[in-house]
Image (cartoon, rainbow, N blue to C red):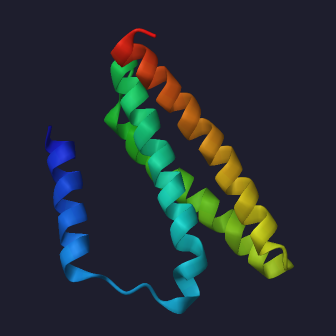
Amino acid sequence: MIAVLGLVLGVVVGILTRPVVPAGLEPYLPIAVVAALDAVFGGLRAMLDGLFDDKVFVVSFLSNVTVAALIVFLGDKLGVGAQLSTGVVVVLGIRIFSNAAAIRRHVFGA
């Protein structure tokens, strides 16, 4: 419950303060959000499976965002940033939908 309250509080503070992302970091923001969503859906699935561990969740969250940002950074330096960004979004999207399907099966039994 505390995590949900923290999430809601973070979203409200973000909406009210309207933080400005520096231009140099703008290409990484969508990738970081998708990587964070992957970790959140994975954590929710683990919780429903009875396997949730807060340390694993935090490490997964931080490592997903870091690795995704590094892949996009490497792609930018090699001149293929858009292709690697697309690859990261596709892979993380598949994981998110896989976790969402498992969550749906837990919640609705279907």
Q: Residue at x 71, y 64 (%)?
A: 85
Which residue is nearer to you in this view: 67 or 106?
Answer: 106
Examine the rendered structure and indicate whether residue 3 appears above or below residue 8: above
Say left or right for 94 vs 86. left
Q: Residue at x 54, y 82 (%)?
A: 25
Which residue is nearer to you in this view: 12 or 44?
Answer: 12
Place residue 55 in its image quadrant: top left
Residue 107 % position (x, y):
34, 17
The answer to whether any part of residue 60 appears in the image is no
Residue 62 % position (x, y):
47, 54
Which residue is nearer to you in this view: 62 or 6?
Answer: 6
Say left or right for 91 vs 105. right
Residue 33 % position (x, y):
48, 60
Q: Residue at x 46, y 44 (%)?
A: 39
Place residue 91 in its image quadrant: top right
Residue 26 % position (x, y):
54, 81
